[in-house]
Image: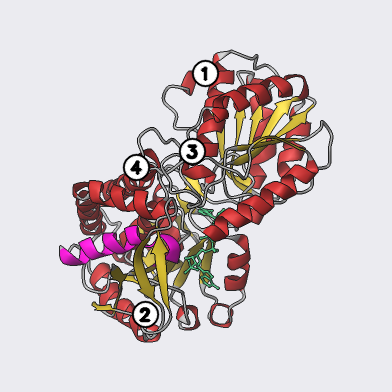
Amino acid sequence: MITLRSHLGGSWFRGQGKEETLVNPATEEPLATVVTGGADLAAALDFARRRGGEALRALTFAERGELLKAMSDLFQAHREELLDLAVANGGNTRSDAKFDVDGAIFTLSTYAELGRALGARRVLADGEGVQLGRSPRFHGQHLLVPRQGVAVHINAFNFPAWGTAEKAATALLAGVPVLTKPATSSALVTARMVELLVEKNVLPVGALSLLVGRVGDLLDHVGPQDVVAFTGSGATGQKIRVLPALVRHSVRLNVEADSLNAAVLGPDVEPDSETWGFYVKDVVRDMTQKAGQKCTAIRRLLVPADKADRLRDDLIERLSAVTVGNPAHEGVRMGPLATAGQRDDVRQGIDLLARDGRLVLGSFEVKAVGAPEGKGFFVAPTLIEVEPGADAPSVHGHEVFGPAATVVPYSGGAAEAVALVARGEGGLVSSVYSEDVGFVGDVVLGLAPYHGRIFMGSAKIAEASPGPGTVLPQLVHGGPGRAGGGEELGGLRGLEFYQQRVALEGSRPVIERIAGLSVS
Ligand code: NAP
């Protein structure tokens, strides 16, 4: 069995201390060990800041883009190996694994292309310059320059490839070195990605460090030029926010946390119509893809009350046909949850939601195809329904990070739908499925302050769309309130977290020269 190693200070490091075992969540077979502790994390951060930061800042955007392209090409060349690891260590079906690994490859190549387009500069102008006095010579211009720290990336267990890549792509393109820490339970994929990059010398020394195992005292050593980007549970996010080093140095922090994503079905949508089918398909995909362990998965189904029974029955029919089991086994469409702890949390969460309403599909006794008897962290697709007008506090207040969703009937008006969704206190993405442009407009503008992204499902885009659960690098990802208040990706917007915005005020020719904006 292999022991995962960190890559810190430019060399491989095997921890000293408590050993933990990473398992296959479908069979509980041990796959690797990781030993946490013993690393000098202050020195590792310092090395990244000095060596990695200097090397990256010396490159132009186009050159940094080439690095991202090389990363993307390397992962593409080793795609099969990474998919196999994701199936074994993540409980992913092959299709789930592709969602993660191909998402990583696509995001890196998208940012590589942005780098190419920015060309031979090292800093970015932010908007147009402005005349500040009567004379045009007195001028102002905002610039975005790379911070001279390290980007500490702490990722959740559910996207070990994409989560690592989407954060690294923006930081590296901005010119900031990265120290990435995957969640321990599913670290095999990330560890292999970094191993490949080191083997092939893809990145400058110090540009990407890896910490496997628990976080230890890493966050005690962050400083004023560093940034921390965290993805995971709201509870961990809250702990990180108040860490003394972050508070003392005003360390920039991005939190991507829980979300009770809702999908509103419009009153105009008739059963069996194309839009109805699109809605059902997206809900079933979100509930079963990665066994519902997607931060963007639909959790609350807002349905006009007169159609709630029909929708429930359609979903029960589709979800009952999903084969749950060991994803390595032919024909399995939904795998297990990532860990025993996640399975227990999900079971407790389902119990909580069911107290607000009625369990209409799902059982904790799962017949898992191809898994050894009594092994694996399986939960069946689970549907709950609440009565029209029921208060249902846990449905709107508790994220069940698994294959579960709740049917929430509403009376049909946009204002009521918006008010119900807003009870989630901020989300990553919510959606509205309708062909009624007036209804869609009212819902979108009502939901907008509470979300980072809003998906509009209609028959016109059904063929082209991957649904609300897919995060695209061109659009921002993140959301207010419960979702952590963070924002990632969104094309060049994603770089700003790693850059310092500075206002230059002075003589126009001098400013233009510094900014590299001068045409002469
Ligand atoms: P988690 O338990 O909060 O762990 C997330 C990461 O934080 C892991 O790498 C974990 O390391 C690390 N960590 C744990 N305790 C820490 C501490 N005290 N200080 C610093 N880091 C610490 O979350 P999870 O169970 O992996 O992920 C599930 C949650 O993530 C769900 O609630 C989901 O909604 C959310 N999520 C959000 C997004 C998004 O983009 N908004 C995406 C994916 C998931 P160890 O594994 O070593 O403990």
Q: Is residue 391 magenta?
A: no
Q: Is mark 2 within 8 Å of ligand 1?
A: no
Q: Quadrant of the C terminus?
A: bottom left
Task: State whether residue 154 appears in this view.
Answer: no
Give the CA separation, mark 2 to mark 4: 32 Å
* Residue 196 lies in the magenta stretch: yes
Closer mark to the observer between disc 3 and disc 1: 3
Dot 2 crowding, Cα within 10 Å, few <14, some 14–19, many 20+: many
> Tag 4: Cα neighbours inside 10 Å, few (<14), some, or many (≥20)?
many
Q: Mark 4 or mark 3, which has the lower sequence index? A: 4
Image mark for residue 98: 4
Question: Of label 2 and label 4, which has the lower sequence position?
Answer: 2
Tell me residue 365's x, y (percent). 60, 43
Cα–Cα span, label 4 and label 3: 18 Å
Question: Where residue 309 sits: x, y (%)?
Answer: 72, 22
Q: What kind of residue is marked 4?
A: Lys
Q: Residue furthest left?
A: 200
Q: Residue at x 33, y 78 (%)?
A: 49
Residue, disc 1: 459
Q: Which residues fall within the magenta stretch? A: 181-199
- Few, some or many C-alpha atoms within 10 Å of disc 3 (few <14, some 14-19, many ≥20)? many
Residue at the spot of label 3: 324
C-alpha separation, residue under disc 2 versus residue under disc 1? 50 Å
| Front tag of 3 and 2 | 3
Q: Is residue 231 visible?
A: yes
* Mark 4 Cβ inside 8 Å of ligand 1: no
Closer to the eye: label 4 or 1: 4
Which residue corresponds to mark 2?
Answer: 45
At numbered mark 3, what does the secondary structure look like: helix, strand or loop?
loop
